[in-house]
Image (cartoon, rainbow, N blue to C red):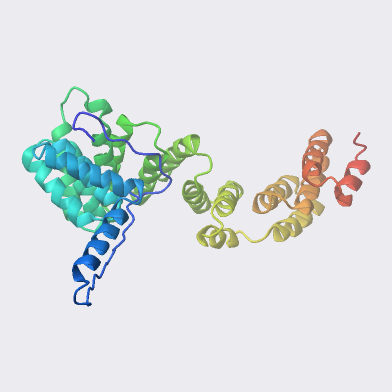
Amino acid sequence: MSDNAPATREPSRSPERTDTIFRIVIIALVAGVIGLGALLGYSVWQGRQEELTATPAQRAIKDLEKSVKAAPNSAATRVRLAEALAAAGSLKQANEQLAIAVKLDKNHTGAYLDLGIIAMEQKQLGRAEKYFNKVVELTQNTQFEAMNSRREQALFHLGEIALAQKRYEDAVGFFKGAIRIRKDASDTYYLLAQSLRGMGEDEAAVKQLDAALAFDPNYPEAHYLYGVILLSQGDKINAAVHLRKAADLAPERKQPVDELKKLGTAEDAIKSGRELLADGKKQAALDQALLARALDPKSVAATIFYADVLVAQDSKPAAIKALKEAAVSEPANKELQSKLAELGAK
């Protein structure tokens, strides 16, 4: 990465944007046969050289090491080598190259950004914060401040650190600063929503979750937080919609399922709704029907009950439409077909 070229990153769904894989490769070389030591030593060396260039990443490292030897005073080349080393899990060597890079060019924002990311990976948040603040300082009041990718990434990571330390007001400021530069990052909106939630500003948090889901409709964490906020506000139906979506998108997570359990089951909602409908409480029955469908969108029983409530409210066309939509995925379901026939659907 040259100092003039902005760093780039792929959109992420989670607060972690760094994908460094930590690996330690230990090679023991033992040559114990007298007389064959030189030959064995050469064979091991040759095998090691082949191993070092066995993958594209390793070949890139070897090529960049040659470039550094050819131009030892190039900060940009050392940063590229450091990034290749970090991607291969060689964080110590990466840090060494970056330390040299910032000595050669004290204003190299890419080097400071990489140092911060590595420090975050090593759970050294204080050091990371220092490096990210340096990037922000160096990019302030510059010609391309409003579209500097490195500045945006530094602000994002500063927001992550502040949020982790429950400095919610600071986190809000950092995330808003990042959004001013990059307006399509769903993870930034999500973490901004988390920060606002920490400050007790749920309505503002919901607006940020709307933005996050506009850019990534299948963002499970955003749906989960949305559901939790709505549930705390007593909006059970819409809470169930988002929590169900979160559970379906991330079946390995237990939190959405645990929150859904607080709302009961679709069967519970249907039973309660039918009792309400029998008492003539049509609107309350409709709420239970909607809750049942939100809790279990595939439930035929919930769809049929929903249709019954619509008919009771003189909305027969809407009832038929709901039944036909369910029949698309359940064409052989006798209950659906029977209910459609009962309503005279064609």
Q: Position of residue 302 (x, y in %)?
A: 75, 51
Q: Position of residue 233 (x, y in %)?
A: 50, 50
Residue at image position (72%, 51%) is: 298
Judge left or right: residue 184 versus residue 110: right
Whether residue 320 is visible to the viewer of this picture, yes or no, is yes
Q: Nearer the viewer, residue 161 or 319?
A: 161
State the residue lying farthest toward the top.
Answer: 143
Residue 188: image quadrant is: top left
- Asked if 222 appears above or below 45 in the picture, the reply is above
Quadrant (top left/top right/bottom left/bottom right) for the C terminus: top right
- Asked if 173 appears above or below 46 in the picture, the reply is above
Q: Position of residue 102 (x, y in %)?
A: 10, 42
Whether residue 160 is visible to the viewer of this picture, yes or no, is no
Residue at image position (91%, 47%) is: 338
Q: Nearer the viewer, residue 278 or 58?
A: 58
Q: Nearer the viewer, residue 282 or 122?
A: 122
Q: Position of residue 160 (x, y in %)?
A: 30, 49
